[in-house]
Amino acid sequence: MELNIDASDFNKTLAPWIGLTYKMMNQYIADELFKNNIQVTKQQWIILKILQEKNDEVIQNDLAFITNRNKASLTRLISLMEKNNLVYRAISKEDARKNLIFSTETGKKLFEQMKPLMITSIKNIQKGLTEDDILQLIKTLSKIQHNIKIQSL
């Protein structure tokens, strides 16, 4: 579909719909965490999830890449999580320039406590969508991400 910028109604383009949906999903998850008295952000849960999936040890720079965060932003997030006893840092024995991030027992327990809530939240968000709908949306968003990446080079 060719877009005529001069006569365009931007509400008929993808950008505002994707942006609003992202904001609504973040707010919904934040509300669910608050209602369940869980004092962790979605971003912190994502870090705990990655640590769980990677068997608890991830190089900090790799974590920045995986989460698509810049190093300074991730460092602040990790520092806050350390302060709340959810993760800890250690210097790699093989390469002193690398920080390793680990879950604490508190972080592991919190992840397990949050997991059913996050699964339910995702199911609620995806309610009424078929598996084909979800796969098609992922495929479409992947194409959009590709288009953005090649324009950013």
Image (cartoon, rainbow, N blue to C red):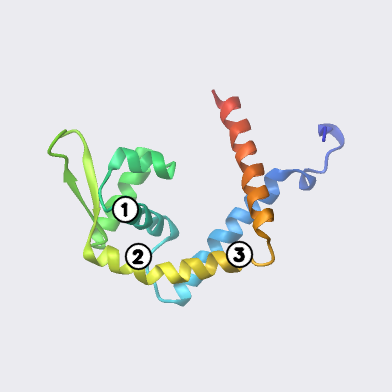
Which callout, 2 or 3, points at the residue further toward the start of the chain? 2
Residue 146, horizontal then vertical, whole percent: 59, 33
Residue 15, horizontal then vertical, whole percent: 68, 44
Tell me the amino acid under the disc marked 2: Phe
According to the picture, the residue beneath numbered tag 1 turns out to be 51
Quarter the N terminus occupies: top right
Q: Quadrant of residue 122?
A: bottom right
Tell me the amino acid under the disc marked 1: Leu
According to the picture, the residue beneath numbered tag 2 turns out to be 111
Q: Residue at x 12, y 39 (%)?
A: 93
Give the CA separation, mark 3 to mark 1.
24 Å
Q: Residue at x 71, y 44 (%)?
A: 14
Say which element carries label 2. Answer: helix
Quarter the C terminus occupies: top right
Q: Residues within 10 Å of mark 2 (few under 14, many from 20)?
A: many
Give the CA separation, mark 2 to mark 3.
20 Å
Q: Nearer the viewer, residue 55 or 87?
A: 55
Which callout, 3 or 1, points at the residue further toward the start of the chain? 1
According to the picture, the residue beneath numbered tag 3 turns out to be 125
Q: Residue at x 40, y 42 (%)?
A: 66
- Verify CB contact (< 8 Å) between mark 1 and mark 2: yes
Q: Residue at x 22, y 44 (%)?
A: 100
Residue 95, horizontal then vertical, whole percent: 16, 33
Residue 65, horizontal then vertical, whole percent: 39, 38
